[in-house]
Structures are given as C-alpha cells and as structure tokens.
Image (cartoon, rainbow, N blue to C red):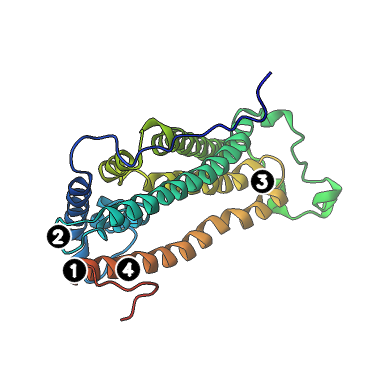
Amino acid sequence: MLDQGKSHRVRPTPASLLPGDRNARLCAMAAETREKLKAWSSQETTSTFDKLFEGVGAHEGVGGLLRIAVLDPSGSGQLTDEEADRFLAESSLLFEEICHFMNIAALVSALAFTVAVPLAVLNLDGLSTFDAIDASLGGAQSPGWYKVWHRARLLHATHWAGHLLLALSVYAAFNAIALCFVMIPSYSFYLPDVESRLRFFVQDHDKIQNVWAYTYGSVALLLLSLPFLAARISPVASMCALIPAASAFTVFRALLSRADYMANFQLDIARRLLADGGEVFRGEVVS
C-alpha cells in the first residue's frame, strides 16, 4: 500500500547539465544563430522557395532561430542569470510548440496514410464498373463519350496515374510520420535539458521545414489521385472527383501567397534584429 498522506517532490530538470559558464555558452549560441541568419537577412525581399530562406530552415527554422538570436543581440557576451533563466523558460515553450506542431502533422499524415494504403492495394476490377446504358448514367440516351470512356487503353493509363499518385501520397505520409517520430522525442526526452535542445535545434534547424511539405503533399497527392481512381467506376464519379483534386492546386496557391508574406515578415524582423542591435519591435513590424 502506498502512503497516501506522503507527498512526493519532483526535482526539476536543471537549467544546464554542461560544465562551465552557462551564460557565456548561451551568448555564443545566439551569436552563431545570428551568423546563420546574416546572409538571408541581407536581402531586400524573400520568398518561400528562396534558396537562402530554405537554407535557414524556411518558416519553421527561421521562427526558432529568431527566438535564439534575440538573446544578447549587441554581442557583448554579457548576460545576467535572470536573463538566462528567462530565456531558457521561454525556449522551453518553443519546444512545446514544436512538439505540438509535429503531433498535428503526424496525425494528419497518418490519416492520409490509412486512406491511401487501402486504395493503393484495392483491386478495382472487383468493383462494379459502370455500363454506359445504366439508368444512373442516362440509359440508352447517355452521351456518346460515356460509351467510349471505358476503353481499355484509356483506363490502363488512368490506372497507372492513380496508383502512381497514391504511391507518392503514401511515400510523403510515411516520411512525415517518420520525421515526427524522430523529432518529437529529440525535443522532449532524448536530450536532457533545454540548453542541449537549443544546441541541437541550431544544428538541425533546416529539417523541420520538411514536416509541413510532406504532410501537405500526402493529402494533396491523395486528392489528385481521386479522379483517376474514379475513372474506373464511372465518368460521373471521375468528373466530380476533379473538384477536390482542383482544391489541391487552389489551396496551395492561396497558402503560397500567405507563406511569401510571412517569409517577408520574418525577414523584416531579422533585418531589424541584426541591424539595430536588438532594438526590435514587440508585437508588429512598423515599416
């Protein structure tokens, strides 16, 4: 029997397990981070597919690097214990946000995976394919192109296209899940304290951007495969499946516009941070 009246104290994780001057190490890490941002932040504008932007980890990587770079922005190397403690506490929240993001990405990718895999191995010949004179397709008065829709060569090509897109969807979903399985424990319990996680993030900051790309790709490729898979069922099903497939393009264009805006917003922050010695806004960028 456990003693229910006995309280148990949990010893908090120490701020750093490394020997030596913690504050000096944090200042050096912040200086290294600013050096990584320097080439990209020297530009007037940027974009989602800017090579320099991708080199610093795109939106995800830059978001984390900026949080580290703001520490000791003047490069004096002087940091009080209170400032260091506050920085490490805020950094702990950063890793909670990273893990939350990757949990959602893993869930979405897993859902796409569980849909795409059965479709990829399903024997579509076992389904009831359409007959051009079926009542649901207009009967004997159905359009002529309904009657030629199920020609063997055309259906063979759509079969290849549909399964190729499904295979790519499964590939993207698996990569997203695998990345999340590695990164979540890396930023939670593989590394013993906040400082070691920060140091690992600085070295690995350009990998997190792949999580979003693989997650979105798994869903988008699944949607793109639907018209080709439905072609073996009926022309009506295939044409209607074009609607969600088209959304994969339209939504991506909308997201890309917003992503470019966010990239330039981050660029403005980085330029002000590196140029003004840390006299950066708190809240919004004022042009």
Give me the C-alpha separation between circle 3 and circle 2.
69 Å
User: In the image, what residue type sits under mark 3?
Assistant: Trp
Q: Are marks 3 and 4 in contact (CB under 8 Å)?
A: no
Residue 124 location in percent, x, y? 67, 32
Q: Is any part of residue 158 visible from this angle?
A: no
Q: Is residue 165 left or right of residue 34?
A: right
User: In the image, what residue type sits under mark 2?
Assistant: Gly
User: What residue does disc 1 label?
Assistant: 277
Residue 42 location in percent, x, y? 17, 66
Q: Are marks 2 and 1 in contact (CB under 8 Å)?
A: yes
The correct choice, above or below, for 128 with respect to 257 in the image is above
Q: Residue at x 27, y 57 (%)?
A: 53
Q: Secondary structure at mark 3?
A: loop
Viewer-nearest of discs 3 and 2 = 2
Give me the C-alpha separation between circle 1 and circle 3.
67 Å
User: In the image, what residue type sits under mark 1?
Assistant: Gly
Q: Earlier in the sequence, mark 3 or mark 2?
A: 2
The disc label shown at residue 75, or none = 2
Q: Quadrant of residue 230?
A: top right
Q: Earlier in the sequence, mark 4 or mark 1?
A: 4
Q: Is any part of residue 146 visible from this angle?
A: yes
Q: Is residue 150 left or right of residue 264?
A: right
User: What residue does disc 3 label?
Assistant: 149
Viewer-nearest of discs 1 and 3 = 1
